[in-house]
Image (cartoon, rainbow, N blue to C red):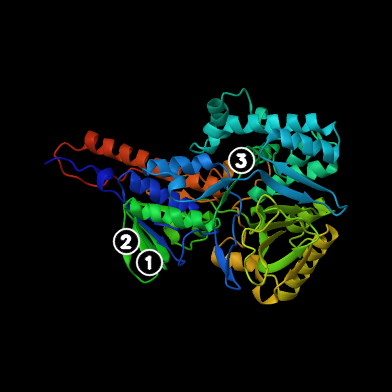
Amino acid sequence: MPIPDPAAAERVVVIGAGIGGLAAAITAAARGLQVTLVERAETPGGKMREVAAGGALLDAGPTVFTMKWVFDALFAEAGTSLEDHLELERAETLARHGWTDGSRLDLFADPACNDDAIGAFAGASEVPRFQAFRQDARRIFETLKDSYIAAQRPGPLELTRRAGIPDLTAIKPFASLWSALGGYFQDPRLRQLFARYATYCGSSPFDAPATLMLVAHVELEGLWRIRGGMHRLARAMSSLASDCGAQVIYGCEAAEILVERGRTSGVRLANGEVLPAESVIFNGDAAALSTGLLGRAAGRAVPGMPVDKRSLSAIVWTLLGRPAGFPLQHHNVFFSDAYRAEFDAVFRQDRLPDEPTVYLCAQDRDEDDRGEDRSRPDGDERLYLLVNAPPRGDRHPLNSEEIEQCAERAFALLRRCGLEIEPRPDTMQATTPNDFHRLFPATGGALYGRASHGWTASFQRAGARSKLPGLYLAGGSVHPGPGVPMAALSGRLAVERLLADSTSRRRSFRAGIAGGIWTRSATTGATD
């Protein structure tokens, strides 16, 4: 009797239809595994949410789409292309930045336009400093792209070997981003602008390593807009997973990861149904596992994370309104005059900042400052505002008074920068750390997993393989980190690790069983 090939019939349950889980489902199904994806929400996307306001749909999660090559590879493996499913437009203007002194600076996809803009904004002497910064940011990204970002998680020594660098100082992990930027820029506004990229990882620029300069390179290299909104990406990925043969089930909550003889055996749903599986890919915050929300056995599969290591949370307002005074672009950032105090409040004092920096996505704006959807009879625009907040939604939930005061401070900053917004009151919705904790349990509202504070933080994120054989991890809380493309990469890395382990088990069957009787191996795997 021939020995069955375990990988050929391997059943995989993916928990969570965020971007990491969707990428894992697409990759696993495209490689011939039997995939069931379960999601407790009624729609895909996870943090890539969409909300309704006044008859309009608004993105209420990530609004920036970069590293398109990640999704090109994902869709190509499934036999299609990103452009077959979505209408994309490369942005010429990346973002508009405003300060309370009335100054403004746009960043562009065209390097020559950036040089001209920075020279006009801060003086000719800052142009070569910006060019040096951009060159070093590119060098860090190119050093880490294949050796770290798109690869299974290494340790520090393994990283230096993979990257071909003599020591870690080449990627600037030992200085803070804020201090490193002081060596590039003399204009404090430029230092503040490029320090903001630490928040893309949910971190403070005063504590995050200068390695995060690479985030600026990623955005300067190219930013795309998805016609219809970012949520279209999640829907396209969900459809592609189904086209590849995955069974995708919404409104279906996973209650427990089941274990038999030391490895995963399936998933028990909240309704009591059991989905048998040889492997499980968990696409949720790793804290949900370590706190035991999916069973005691799975809780021992990943290390716990101290509350004080959590990343940023946020308060997000979605609304319809009429902006005036400041010429908005699609992406806009309005900077606080008290930048260090903002991060001290969130990370050291566990409270909302007195003067928060405000990110504003004007979702109807095109390159010419005109609205793509101004035909709406009421003339309102779809607006998304975000301010940083402490991840305390499970310990000290914000009350209505605190939320209202934060909104007043945010809108006051906008007015000081020259922007007036007349919101339609019946459309304005706030999503707070309390809400994010409810949507993403065990996080306290932290949106990016562990904060990237200190040079070892990135190595402390879990890798694709957990301590429990057969349980694999995806999502923004694990390697290679937070952000839409990083989450997609994590899903692909989880499947690659799963398949490598399946091959290892298959070899152990062939080496150890001569009589043709197939039994499941009890071989255990080490944590990444």
Kindly check if marks 2 and 1 are in contact, taking CB atoms under 8 A apart as contact: yes
Q: Residue at x 60, y 24 (%)?
A: 165
Residue 469 lies, in percent from the top left, at: 38, 47
Residue nearest the viewer, comparing 512 with 66: 66
Q: Residue at x 79, y 29 (%)?
A: 128
Q: Which mark is residue 269?
A: 1
- Other residues around mark 2 within 10 Å, as few (<14) / some (14–19) / many (≥20): some
Q: Residue at x 68, y 68 (%)?
A: 380
Give the mark nearer the N terminus: 3 vs 1.
3
Residue nearest the viewer, comparing 464 with 126: 126
- Other residues around mark 1 within 10 Å, as few (<14) / some (14–19) / many (≥20): some
Q: Is residue 395 visible?
A: no
**Image position of 371 with respect to 42: above or below:** above
**Image position of 507 with respect to 361: above or below:** above
Q: Which residue is mark 3?
A: 222
Q: Which residue is mark 2?
A: 275
Q: Quadrant of the N terminus?
A: top left
Residue 167 lies, in percent from the top left, at: 63, 26
Give the mark nearer the N terminus: 2 vs 3.
3
